């Protein structure tokens, strides 16, 4: 009976206004849901050495013969010790150091578990510095291994401070080149000066 009263000619405008209001609320809820879904379901993964992940490795070489090295595995490189791994877990005053008279490198290998086709960005952050008596001697370059081209390519970032600084690189394409079919991704930092 009440439904019939609402449908009377005099109340038809109220019904239309109510329907428009309900439709607006539904559209607003749908739009809000889409925005929320975008924020909530955006994937983010962090790879580091602080979670005891045995598939992520780090290597040091004090005898690299070229800048950048000619191969993925740098000559004379050794995997970091447990002490060195603990030194790269946090941004603090503990550092994994390598000394020699040749080019020195630290190579970092990560096992990426996301599907390459779903990745839209890779951010690389490295903190450290090299010793030397002047800025050119302290230069550090950051490279990413290209599995397709089979080389380190050109330096993507560099610095030459005499205290800790950050090298940051953002990759937004080329993921099929930088991540191999087994999911491995490698980046390298290398000093430029060969005698200090």
Image (tube, rainbow, N blue to C red):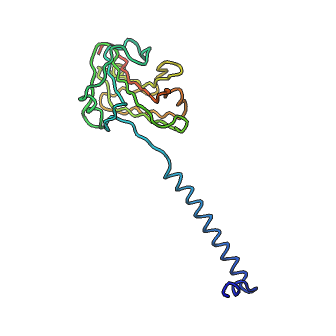
> Along the horizontal axis of the image, is 92 left or right of 176?
left
Residue 36 image offset from top left, x and y in percent:
52, 56
Of 111 and 60, the residue lying toward us = 111
Residue 16 placement, left or right of 187: right
**Residue located at (44% from left, 28% from top):** 184
Image position of 139 with respect to 24: above or below: above
For the point 54% across and 29% down, the residue is: 176
Residue at position x 44%, y 34% from top? 112
Residue 84, position in %: x, y? 26, 28
Residue 107's quadrant in the figure? Answer: top left
- In the rendered image, the quadrant that contains the C terminus is top left
User: In the rendering, at what x and y percent does residue 181 appear?
Assistant: 50, 27
Q: Residue furthest top?
A: 65
Horizontal arrangement in the rendering, residue 25 relative to residue 116 (left or right): right
Foreground residue among 156 and 86: 86
- The quadrant of the rendering that contains the N terminus is bottom right
Furthest-right residue in this view: 9
Front in this rendered view, residue 78 or 143: 78
Is residue 34 shown left or right of residue 71? Answer: right
């Amino acid at each position: 009976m009440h439904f019939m009263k609402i449908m009377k000619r005099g109340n038809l405008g109220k019904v239309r206004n109510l329907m428009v209001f309900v439709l607006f609320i539904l559209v607003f809820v749908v739009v809000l849901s889409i925005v929320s879904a975008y924020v909530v379901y955006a994937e983010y993964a962090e790879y580091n050495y602080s979670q005891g992940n045995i598939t992520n490795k780090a290597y040091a070489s004090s005898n690299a013969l070229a800048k950048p090295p000619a191969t993925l595995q740098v000559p004379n490189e050794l995997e970091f010790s447990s002490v060195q791994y603990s030194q790269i877990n946090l941004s603090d005053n503990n550092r994994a150091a390598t000394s020699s008279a040749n080019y020195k490198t630290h190579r970092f290998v990560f096992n990426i578990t996301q599907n390459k086709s779903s990745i839209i960005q890779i951010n690389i952050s490295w903190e450290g510095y090299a010793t030397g008596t002047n800025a050119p001697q302290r230069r550090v370059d950051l490279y990413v291994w290209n599995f397709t081209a089979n080389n380190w390519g050109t330096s993507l970032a560099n610095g030459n401070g005499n205290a800790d600084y950050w090298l940051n690189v953002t990759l937004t394409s080329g993921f099929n080149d930088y991540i191999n079919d087994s999911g491995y991704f490698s980046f390298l930092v290398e000093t430029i000066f060969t005698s200090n």
